[in-house]
Image: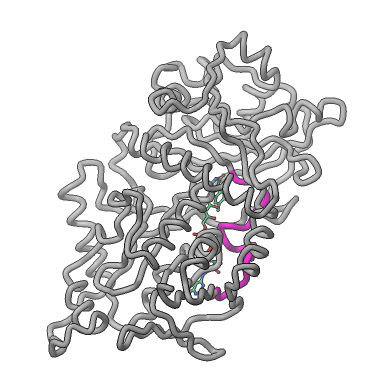
């Protein structure tokens, strides 16, 4: 056995890490300052899109790999976790006249390039196949749909229980130290010792890093959330048109729209969100709200009852964890032995959870991962203080502590920001926005 593992953060990323790590480790403990499934956490909700239709081929490939791992997890737990209704990207000339450069067309080209299952519909074909929509075209990511979050959380709880993982809820870490190759997390209910530490604390990740005396590493994370998220509750007579058996997950991301069908017996209506990420150049259009989108593209919901998702179901009050350079942060924390993190999922992380869990488990317990995660390295935010911190406090190199002043978190952030400003033409020095003129595919990724 490779050792003892502590995971700080019991959202879907921490729990998936524990699930994958348990067969490899002597012991696994998940520690969370709140509780698994707390409504304030990003992993709490009813449905999350699971899709491959990114404009960036690497994210598309990883989403598809994650889907394979979801299927594996479904077989192991004996539950249905993914609902495969497909994901349809819409286009309408009166909304975004330049059809060729829409998210739908560009992401479809990536699906084609990767040979993932897909279907394209002209306006007439769309009306026949998906009469719910009034649009000029639809591009369908076939192996897509949404995850049933309650089922996932339940499956993880049972799976972790069966694998002997301890989940310590309502346990606040107070201080984290390393000595002689052992991590000690001090909590109110006593110390917790391990050989390896994984931090999957979402927007609380920098708080956890702040518990490591002298650690200068902080990640440029920022909370954000959709401006609108509403249920459109169809009239009884037309409801059957809008459930997961007939309607796909849908999106018109150029104008910030995404939606989920009614999940019969679990959600009251068609969920439609409106979100314009601060880092994505939005295509100007006359659609400024979910109601305007429905009026334009889903005629059968024009007379639906409309309720706020949070008010109706108490879900999705949580926040996205945006990253300054709009890439996941996944890998070893620079300057420390046996410390790994996964954070910065930018509102799109849930679908990747089994893949993230597998990567972190491999890093923590198998000295490396079979996946190429160089792009996501936390070390891209490293600062000069990191070497000093690693030498003095953690790696036990045996040298006398250096008396030079350490980088503070703010000076580290400044250093990281100015370094990226030099190297990335898209970077704006005012975190976290892009320069605003960027229209490249790498910065116009889907959330959801
Ligand atoms: C409204 C909304 C809609 C979304 N829609 C989609 C979607 O459709 N598709 C998709 O793929 N993704 C979606 N996402 C993103 C996805 O839900 C998240 O990326 C994912 O749930 C993140 O999981 P996590 O485990 O990193 O974070 P969390 O679930 O937030 O878990 C972090 C955990 O760390 C704990 N913690 C924090 N600080 C500390 C501390 N100091 N000490 C101990 N514990 C701590 C918290 O209590 C929490 O339990 C959405 C997110 C939101 C908010």
Quadrant where the image shows the N terminus? bottom left
| 415 sits left or right of 258 in the view | left
Measuring 56% from the left and 14% from the top, which residue is drawn there?
121
Where 355 falls versus 93 (above or below)?
Answer: below
Where 52 falls versus 406 (above or below)?
Answer: above
Measuring 64% from the left and 35% from the top, which residue is drawn there?
84
Residue 12 at x, y = what percent?
55, 59
Q: How many marks?
A: 0
**Colouring used for the render:** one colour
Measuring 62% from the left and 15% from the top, which residue is drawn there?
126
Measuring 42% from the left and 68% from the top, which residue is drawn there?
205
Nearer to us in this view, 352 or 99: 352
| 291 sits left or right of 240 in the view | left
Residue 207 visible to an observer of this rendering:
no
Residue 192 visible to an observer of this rendering:
yes
Magenta span includes 253: no
| 309 sits left or right of 165 in the view | right
Magenta span includes 44: yes
Q: In the orientation shown, which residue stands out farthest toward the right?
A: 237
Residue 14 at x, y = what percent?
51, 64
Magenta stretch? 32-48
| Predominant SS along the magenta part | loop
Quadrant of residue 60 in the image? top left
Nearer to us in this view, 1 or 152: 1
């Amino acid at each position: 056995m490779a050792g003892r593992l502590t995971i700080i953060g019991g959202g879907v990323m921490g729990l998936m890490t524990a699930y994958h790590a348990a067969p490899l480790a002597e012991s696994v403990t998940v520690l969370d300052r709140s509780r698994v499934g707390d409504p304030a956490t990003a992993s709490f909700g009813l449905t999350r899109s699971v899709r491959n239709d990114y404009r960036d081929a690497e994210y598309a490939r990883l989403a598809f790999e994650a889907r394979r791992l979801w299927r594996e997890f479904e077989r192991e737990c004996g539950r249905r976790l993914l609902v495969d209704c497909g994901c349809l990207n819409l286009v309408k000339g009166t909304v975004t006249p330049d059809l060729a450069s829409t998210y739908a067309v560009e992401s479809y080209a990536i699906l084609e390039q990767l040979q993932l299952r897909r279907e394209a519909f002209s306006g007439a074909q769309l009306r026949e196949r998906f009469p719910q929509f009034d649009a000029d075209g639809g591009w369908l990511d076939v192996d897509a749909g949404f995850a049933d979050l309650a089922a996932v959380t339940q499956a993880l709880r049972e799976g972790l229980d069966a694998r002997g993982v301890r989940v310590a809820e309502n346990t606040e870490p107070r201080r984290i130290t390393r000595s002689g190759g052992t991590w000690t997390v001090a909590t109110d209910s006593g110390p917790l010792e391990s050989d390896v530490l994984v931090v999957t604390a979402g927007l609380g990740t920098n708080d956890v890093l702040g518990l490591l005396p002298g650690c200068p590493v902080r990640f440029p994370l920022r909370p954000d959330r959709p401006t609108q998220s509403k249920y459109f509750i169809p009239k009884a007579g037309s409801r059957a048109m809008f459930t997961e058996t007939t309607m796909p997950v849908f999106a018109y991301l150029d104008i910030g729209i995404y939606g989920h069908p009614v999940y019969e017996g679990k959600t009251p209506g068609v969920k439609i969100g409106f979100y314009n990420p601060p880092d994505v150049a939005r295509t100007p259009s006359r659609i400024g709200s979910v109601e305007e989108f429905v009026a334009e593209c889903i005629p059968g919901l024009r007379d639906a009852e409309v309720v706020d998702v949070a008010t109706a179901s108490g879900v999705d009050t949580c926040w996205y964890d945006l990253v300054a350079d709009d890439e996941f942060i996944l890998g070893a924390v620079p300057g420390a032995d046996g410390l790994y993190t996964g954070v910065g999922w930018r509102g799109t992380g849930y679908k990747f959870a089994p893949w993230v869990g597998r990567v972190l488990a491999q890093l923590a317990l198998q000295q490396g991962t079979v996946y190429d995660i160089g792009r996501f390295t936390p070390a891209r935010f490293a600062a000069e203080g990191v070497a000093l911190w690693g030498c003095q406090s953690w790696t036990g190199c045996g040298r006398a502590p250096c008396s030079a002043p350490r980088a503070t978190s703010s000076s580290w952030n400044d250093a990281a920001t100015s370094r990226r400003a030099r190297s990335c033409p898209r970077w704006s020095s005012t975190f976290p926005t892009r320069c605003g003129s960027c229209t490249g595919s790498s910065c116009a990724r889907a959330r959801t």
